[in-house]
Amino acid sequence: MSNFLQPKRTIAELKELRSLTGDENGAQRVAFTNMWTTTRAWLRKKLEELPVEIHSDEAGNLWAMLKGESERELLIGGHMDSVPNGGWLDGCLNVMAGVEILRRIHAQYGGKPPVTVRLVDWADEEGARFGKSLFGSSACSGTLNMEEARGLKDRDGVRLSDALKQVGVDFERVKESGKELKKAAAYLELHIEQGPVLLDLDLPLGAVLGTFGVERHAITFHGQAAHSGSTPMNRRKDAFLAAGKMSQEIYKIAERNGGVCTIGSCTTKPGIVTSVVEECRITLDQRHLDAAALAKMLREAKAASERFATEGKVKVSWDRLWQIEPVLFNNDLIGLCDEAIGETCGKKYRLPSGPLHDAAEVARAGVPTVMMFVQSLHGISHNKIEDTKEEHLELCVRAFDGLAEKTMIWLQRKAQK
């Protein structure tokens, strides 16, 4: 296998892409923009060097298919789009490692692997322009909320549907892309970790157990505006005071339950220095791999908000912004991922994913799925300083290729039962 695989070529191509689509502030491959179109054209040229069938589906996802002896399909996925001023590896590492694996499989099997292998570049994983993450994969999985997406606009007032039209996609037909998963038998995705877990453990690679479920809410405390000079402290109904207590409590909730909680924004009214805060709105993001634990964290947060509201003589209201259940990956594939990592670098580790990925949508569609993480330096992503050691990049391409080979064998054995 190693005679045909060239991980250094993947690194060179990632650097080539960085030069083509980045600037001094980082990657600029925002979906449905001119730079994204340029990126797609560059990727197509790489794929056209292989005997693969290439097409874009109704949601704008780009597919490359290497036909095999069986119509059962092994899918390898990623995304070429980035956030503005993003990192050089986020998403595109997955795709370019997949391109190299296609090259290896074609060379090793003389263009006819035991199963059909397809590489997909999902459209707009990041949601950077319109605020809707996992657009292409959720359209394909059938979970995309069409009414919600239909009203989305970017900061310049351009509608999502109009931006899609500019790249040849009819918004009303995007869910027709679901037919792409009809023969899918397994889905693999490689990704930089984007966090510090592997870095802190001094491990290069990890097998991903699944993606966290998310509960995202806006919490508004309603108090009473009053003059900041003439109102005694014991007479105030300060909405900000209650919100401030919540900011400390969420850390305790996260620690008790083994999840993560974040207050990401805070706005006040009337928002002037001479007035007690009448209204304070905070946004709370809670995540956990276990559905019961996530529900418990939410209950505890709501109870805490009521307690702090009562203590401060204010009222509180909750509005759900978004929710997704935890998505657990396939146990057999997690085991194969473990094996591939162990054979490549000798050390195995399993961890959950805090960020969401296209893999979650494919798994929600019923396709056996697993992800592999590679260490992120600084534990930082969505930032121009995002980086991974080149030796680890080589390791992840080798391990991911090993996982692909093991998965093809696994699919063959399943078909024989």
Image (cartoon, grey):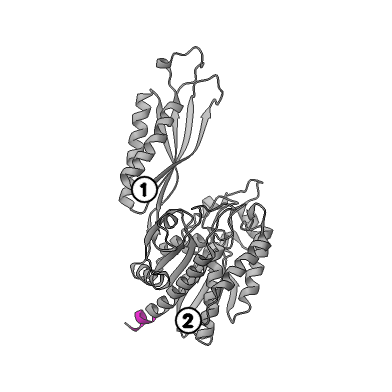
**Magenta stretch, overall SS:** helix
Q: Position of residue 187 (x, y in %)?
A: 44, 69
**Residue depicted at x 48% and y 68%:** 396
Please rate how many residues cluster around mark 2, counting C-alpha atoms within 10 Å: few if below 14, some from 14 to 19, many from 20: few
**Residue depicted at x 36% and y 29%:** 308
**Residue depicted at x 67% and y 62%:** 19
- Indicate whether residue 387 is drawn in magenta: no
Find disc 1 in the rendering and name its residue: 259
Query: Image quadrant of residue 272?
Result: top right
Find disc 2 in the rendering and name its residue: 1
Q: Position of residue 182 (x, y in %)?
A: 45, 72
Residue found at the far bottom of this picture: 110
Residue 167 at least partly seen: no
260 left or right of 296 in image: right
Amino acid type at circle 1 is Gly
The Cα–Cα distance between marks 1 and 2, rounded to whole angstroms, is 40 Å
Q: Position of residue 352 (x, y in %)?
A: 39, 57
